[in-house]
Amino acid sequence: MIPAMDWNLVAKEYAEKLLTQPEYFESYDSFISLFPSLDSEVLDIGCGPASISKYIHEKRPQFRITGIDTSHKMLEYAQHNCPDSFFYLHDARDLSSLKENRFQEKQFDGITIGFCIPYLNKDETKKLLLDCTNRIKPGGAFYLSFIEAILPNHKSEGIKNPESLTQITLYSLEEMKQLLLLCGFVPLFHFQSISKTSFVYKTVAIVSLFVPKMNPKP
């Protein structure tokens, strides 16, 4: 497990930054395009202030969206930004234990994980992806974004980031594609961007479909 930070302390800053990132809109649109029906349900894992949920809701107001996050302050912003959706305090590393009545054994038409896995180690990320296979319907849309590099100097894992005072886990595009395939998700599109904060990040979003027959036993 990567040392955690208190996300409640930076919720306001993240809410202001993450709602104004048009460089990710094309990847969101590709995810939305995979839904054949307006009667769809989406699970937003590590939802933060609901930047992805808000965008989806504005494009597809008929969708029913549920988000989870470990920060109650992030969830306050999420509920404000996306008032017609449902948000719960829950750790993505223990997705299988989510017991609220709205969940139980529910499967969703699509799942998003926006920049959650940089704060998980690689074993936790693999477990999360496998847990998602029990929460997504066959043929469901899957959105995942992550950090590929911190420029100009970076290592494969465990970069110290003074902005968040935590550790960042990095993945190459090919490494993540292979992990997705291993877990039953077939990558269709990928989008690479440069994000500037205290560091310059090379970020990647992958949009996939879930194919159950490719799903291995955990």
Image (cartoon, helix red, strand yellow):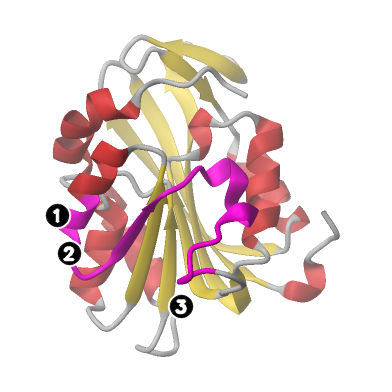
Instruction: Please give the label number shown on residue 120.
Output: none
Magenta part of the chain = 78-103
Q: Which residue is drawn at 68% across and 40% down?
A: 175
Q: How far apart are marks 1 and 2 (CA)?
A: 5 Å
Mark 2, secondary structure of its residue: loop
In the structure shown, which secondary structural element does the residue marked by tag 3 occupy? loop
Q: Quadrant of residue 40?
A: bottom left
Q: Which of marks 3 and 1 is in front?
A: 1
Whether residue 144 is in magenta: the answer is no
- In this view of the protein, which residue sits in the foreground, 159 or 201? 159
| Dot 3 alpha-carbon crowd within 10 angstroms: few under 14, some 14 to 19, many 20 or more | some
On the rendered structure, is 16 left or right of 158?
left
Residue under the point 66% across and 37% down: 124
Residue 34 rendering spot, x and y as whole percentages: 46, 77
Circles 1, 2 touching at the beta carbon (< 8 Å): yes
* Tag 1 residue: 80
Amino acid type of the residue that numbered disc 1 sits on in the rendered structure: His
Residue ranking furthest to the right: 217
Nearer the N terminus, badge 3 or badge 1? 3
Q: Rounded to the nearest whole Å, what is the CA distance between mark 3 and mark 2?
A: 24 Å
**For the residue labelled by badge 1, is the local secondary structure a helix, a strand or a loop?**
helix
Q: How far apart are marks 3 and 1 (CA)?
A: 27 Å
Q: In which quarter of the image is residue 26?
A: bottom left
Name which of mark 3 and mark 2 comes first in the sequence. Answer: 3
Residue 99, position as x, y percentages in the image: 55, 61
Image spot of residue 148 (x, y percent): 51, 32
Please tell me which residue lies in front, 92 or 202: 92
Task: Tell me the amino acid under the disc marked 3.
Answer: Leu
Mark 2: give few (<14), some (14-19) or many (20+) Cα within 10 Å: few
Mark linked to residue 34: 3
What percent of the width, then of the height, locates residue 141?
52, 71
